[in-house]
Amino acid sequence: MSNVVKPEANESRSETLLREIMSGTPLRIGLSALLAFMFGAIFMAAFNQDVVDSYATFGSDPMLTFQTAWDTIVNGYTSLLTGSIFNPNGGDAVSMFRPITETLRLSAPLILAGLGVSLGFRVGLFNVGGTGQILMSLLGVTWVSTRMTMPWGIHLIVALIVGVVLAAAWGGLVGLLKAKTGAHEVIVTIMLNYVALYLYTWFLREPSLLLEHGGGGTPKSDPPAVTAQMPLLLGPSFDLHIGILIAIAAIFVYWWLMERSAIGFRFKMVGANSHAARAAGIKIESTYIWALAISAAFVGLAGVNQGLGQAGGLTASVNGNIGFDAITVALLGGSRARGVMFAGLLFGAFKAGGPSMQLAGVSPEILGVVQALLVLFVAAPPLVRAIFRLPKKEAN
């Protein structure tokens, strides 16, 4: 079945384009990624200091500039691979395989949050509130893991449930405001991001709430109790924990929810054509509430991952911009479970491989350029179709 959704008859041109962006096909998304890496290579070569230094001899020895530029591109992307997948020069098994474990660890919250944003996209909603939903999840997770005493295992499960419920309630509030007042979810979620940030920061500053006992000047929580921390998968030599297993489980849950369940069918029907869905007897307002609540619940799992996946205390910056990176992951993944998984792994590889690129003399900011270009090309379907001469409805 084609991923391209037929626009409603009374949609504006911008609304039709937005739906096309949110339902990107694997072909167009793959070509967008190819373009992003190609332009990233150009930026890498053009602005590397060694290449710039070679410009002085370009008139007498142009091949030196070209060779230096080529070496820079090869070293940059090779370093990305060795820093995110496998390091053959590691010297021991731990050093050689640590890159792939770091990629998996850093991918888990991106996949979880990306699934949440993707669910909103499938219903025609733009959930920009990932940051606030992660922080609300962290609020509950931090409280349970630092202020409550429970047996091992039960403590982790209770903290997870509380974090997901708080995030879902935060997202459901957006759906309620949209259903009852017509407030646009983009505006509401952006504003609630600030509310959640300052609320969490206030909790961190209060010694009676979450503030670290005897901590320094930076507001920080106590570390989560050992009984609430996510167990390591491969022992103390690696930081990879069960967060990646939760992400894998969430992928299957998302797939079943959207592709096999009755509520997923209603979600997709509302996203494809809300007027037809209403005519078919679907309650649009309640669908918005449930969609944004479930969307936020997936994002909340990313907050659980961040809050219980480390032994140290938490600060307000622990969300690590995951809420906004999730939008890119959802777009790149075409809002499909498998696509979000691969997009999350790609962005996790970017995070894991960035330091290795810097050690190789390539600015890690190049990866930021690649990510920005990915968003640009994914969000510009006509541009990609024009460059590669694709038909109006490219094949899946």
Image: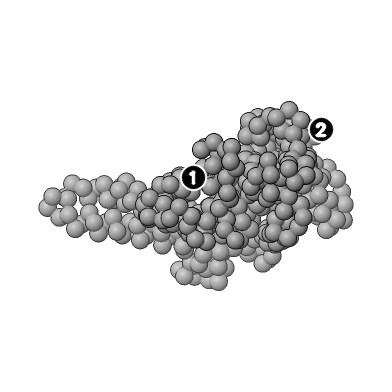
In the depicted view, which residue is nearer to us: 257 or 132?
257
Q: What is the x, y in percent for residue 352?
A: 53, 56
Q: In this image, 60 relative to 253: left or right? A: left
| Residue sticking out furthest to the right | 150
- Label 2–label 1 contact, CB within 8 A: no
Q: Say if 267 sits above or below 339 in the image.
A: above
Estimate the x, y position of residue 150 in percent, counting from the top left: 87, 52
**Element assignment for label 2:** loop
Callout 2, which amino acid? Ser
Instruction: Locate residue 76, reporting x and y percent.
Output: 39, 57
Provide the secondary structure element on which disc 1 rests. Answer: loop
Picture quadrant of residue 217: top right
Q: Which residue is mark 1?
A: 379
Q: Is residue 299 visible?
A: no
Of tags 2 and 1, the one toward the viewer is 1
Q: Quadrant of the N terminus?
A: bottom right
Tell me residue 255's x, y (percent).
69, 59
Q: Residues within 10 Å of mark 1 (few under 14, many from 20)?
A: many
Which residue is located at x 16 percent, y 50 percent? 57
Q: Residue at x 81, y 32 (%)?
A: 208
Q: Residue at x 53, y 46 (%)?
A: 21
Image position of 287 with respect to 349: above or below: above
Q: CA distance from mark 2 to mark 1?
A: 46 Å
Left or right relative to 58: residue 378: right
Nearest to N terminus: mark 2 or mark 1? 2
Residue type for callout 1? Ala
Disc 2 residue crowd, few under 14, some 14–19, many 20+, Cα 10 Å: few
Residue that carries the numbered disc 2 in the rendered image = 208
Residue 269 visible in the snapshot? yes
Choose between 98 and 136: the one closer to the eye. 136
